[in-house]
Amino acid sequence: MPPLRPSRDPAVSADHHGVSPPRAPRISDYALLGDCQGAALVSLSGSIDWWCPTRFDAPSVFARLLDPDGGHWSVRPIGEYEVKREYLDDTVVMRTQFSTPTGRLRLTDALALGAGEREHQIGYRSPHAILRFVEVVEGDVDVLMDFAPRPEYGLVTPQLEPTETGVVASGGRDRLVLTSDRPVDIRDGRVTARFSLREHDTVMLTLQHAAGVPEPLPEPLDGRSALTNAIEGWQSWADIHGRYDGPFAEQVMRSALVLQALTYQPTGAVVAAATTSLPEVPGGSANWDYRFAWLRDGSLALKALWVAACPDEAARFFDWIASVAGPTVHGGHVQIMFGVRGEHDLTEHDLPHLAGFGASKPVRIGNDAWSQRQLDVLGEVLEGAWVLRDQLGEIAPSTQAFLASLADRAAASWDQKDAGIWEGREGERHYLTSKLMCWVALDRALKLAPRLGDHARTHAWEQARGAVRAAILRHGWSDSARAYTGAFGSDHLDAGALLMPMMGFLPASDERMLATIDAIESQLSHNGLVQRWTESGEEGAFVICSYWLVSCRALAGQLDRAVELFEAITAHANDVGLLSEEIDIRDGTLLGNFPQGFSHIGLVDAAWAIAQAQANQKTGAEDGQARQQSRVDHRF
C-alpha cells in the first residue's frame, strides 16, 4: 500500500472505549463507506452493520443497524480495547485503530472502486466489494472476525460453502464471496476466525457481491491493490475539487465527499441519505426511507456541489433531473422524488420482521411521498437551471419546453394548496414556502427567458410573479406572531421562512424579515439548533434549518452570530464529521437517517454565506449587503 495521507483536521478523531460490539449503537457511532453506487456503515467497534451493495435502495445484506439479527461483519480485538478512528484524508476510506493492553491493531475499511477510476470517473464501474485490511502496528493482538450475512433485509440466512480461499454465501437474489488469506470456520450460519497476530502481521479480507444463480461468480479481487486503488481514486477526486478556500474548508470538503459518496454515478442522481428508517423520534414511528433522489434536495445540492466541488457534478445532476422529471409535467403534477435510475413508483411498505433501530418501528422501504403534490419542486428545478446557466450552453428545444412548462404550471397553480416542503401527511394547506418557490420558478424563468426561445411567456410570468409576491407579503405575515409564518392565515412559525432571503425574495435586513429571523431563533431554536415549526414537541432540531439560520444571519451582516451558530451546530457532527437529519435538543444525540445529504448541503451553503459576509466586511463596501443579497444571481 502507498503512504497514506494523515488527516489534516485532528478534530475528526476521538477516543472511545468498548469491550464488545454494542447491540444497539448510537447513530453517531457509524461511519460511511461509499463507492458511488451503494453504501455501507461501519461502527466504532469495527462492525459493518449496513450494506446495500448494488445501489443505494437495493435490499441490504447486512442490517444489524435495524435489527440485532439483521446481519453484520465485524473485525475487532478480543478483550478490552480503546478506539480511535479517522477518514484517510480526502477519502471515504475509514481507518480504525484499536489499542489493547498487548498491542495496537489498525483496521482500514473501504468499498472498492473500478480499477483505474480517477477524478470524475470514480464509481462508474464499482465492483460492489468491501475491502478490510487488518494490520498489527505494535505488539501482539488476538483478533476475532464474525461474518453473518443476512440478505434481503435480514430475511434470508444463506447457505455457506467453503472454498480454497474463503466462503461463498448463497441466498435468494444475492451471493457473497468472502476471501481471506487466513483460515476461517463455518458454524451456525456464520463464518468466524480468530487471528493471533504479531507486530507487522497483516490480514486481507474481501467481500464481493454477485447476483444469484445462474450468474457466474466475479473474478477474485486483489484486495491490497483494490484498497490502494480506492484510496487513490477518492484522493484524485478531491484533488480536482479543492476550489473552495473560505472558512471551515475542512468541513466543506468532508461534506463534498459525503455528497459525492451519496451520488449514484451511473446517472448522477444524489440520494437524500444512505439509510432507511432511522427514527426522527427515538421509539417513534416517523421512520422513512431516504435512499431516493428528491428534486428539492437537488436544487440545494447543485449549489453545494458548485461551492464545494465543481460544476461537472452539478451539471450531470441537472441533466438527470430534466430527463426524469420532464415526462411527469404534462397531464399531472411534477413528481418530487425518484429512484436513482429514474423510477417513478416508490410505493412504501413495512418490513415487520425487523425490530427497528432502538425498537423504533415500523421499518419502511419505499416512500409514499412520491405521490404527493408539492409545488415547491417547480422553483427548485428552475433554480437549478439558473444556477447552471453558464454551463447549460445552448438549451435544447426539449429542455426549453420543459423549463417553460414548469413556469407555466407555477403561474397556473401557485394559489392552490399542497403538501408543503416537509411532506406532511395530515392534508394540504397554503404553505408559505410553496408560494415562495412558485415565485422562484417564475423569477428564474423570466431571467432565463432569452434562452427559452418561443416557449417563453414573459408577460404571463411577470403578472403571476407579481401576484405571488403580493400574496406572500399580505397573507404570509402574521401580526400576532410578528413574523412570516408557515402557512397563510397561521400564527405558527416555520423554519422554511428562512428561505425567503436565501432565495432573494427579501433582503435579510428587511424589517419584517429580520423580525422573522429573530422570532425563529428565539422560539424555535435551542442553543442554535432549530426545530421545523411551532409545537414540534419531541421532534429533533433539523440540521439544515439550523444552517439556514446561519446563512440568514450572515446575509443580514451579523457575522459574529453566524460564525457562533455555525460552530455550535457543527460541533454536533460525529467524530468523523458526519451529520444526520436531526439533532436531539435535549442531549445532542444524532437522529434520523444518516449521513444526511440535506444536512451537509446546509453546512456548505452556510460556510459560503459566512465567506461572502467576511469578504464584504473586509472590503468595507457600502453595497456589501446588496452584493450578498444578490448572490442568487451571480455567485455561480
Image (tube, rainbow, N blue to C red):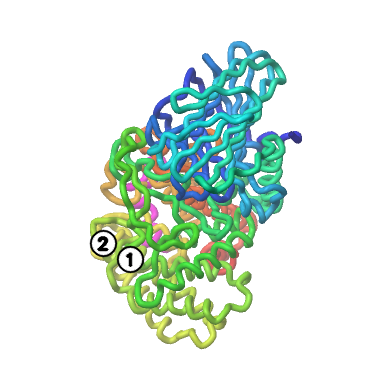
Residue 603 appears in view: no
The residue lying furthest to the right in this view is 2
Q: Nearer the viewer, residue 133 or 242?
A: 133
Disc 2 and disc 1 in contact, CB within 8 angstroms: no
- Mark number, residue 338: none
Residue 257 is situated, as x and y percent measured from the top left of the image, at 59, 47
Element type where label 2 sits in the image: loop
Residue 427 appears in view: yes
Segment colored magenta: 510-530
Q: Main secondary structure of the magenta part?
A: helix
For label 2, the residue is: 479
- For marks 2 and 1, the one nearer the N-term is 1
Which amino acid type is marked by label 1? Arg
Q: Residues within 10 Å of mark 2 (few under 14, many from 20)?
A: few
For image coordinates 45% across by 28% down, the residue present is 189
For label 1, the residue is: 373
For image coordinates 60% across by 59% down, the residue present is 313
User: In the rendered structure, does residue 329 fall within the stretch colored magenta?
Assistant: no
Above/below status of 220 relative to 185: below
Q: Quadrant of the N terminus?
A: top right
Q: Is residue 556 left or right of residue 101?
A: left
Residue 453 is situated, as x and y percent measured from the top left of the image, at 54, 85
Q: Nearer the viewer, residue 191 or 451?
A: 191
Give the quarter of the image for residue 317: bottom right
Q: Residues within 10 Å of mark 1 (few under 14, many from 20)?
A: many
User: In the rendered structure, does residue 529 fall within the stretch colored magenta?
Assistant: yes
The residue lying furthest to the top in this view is 102
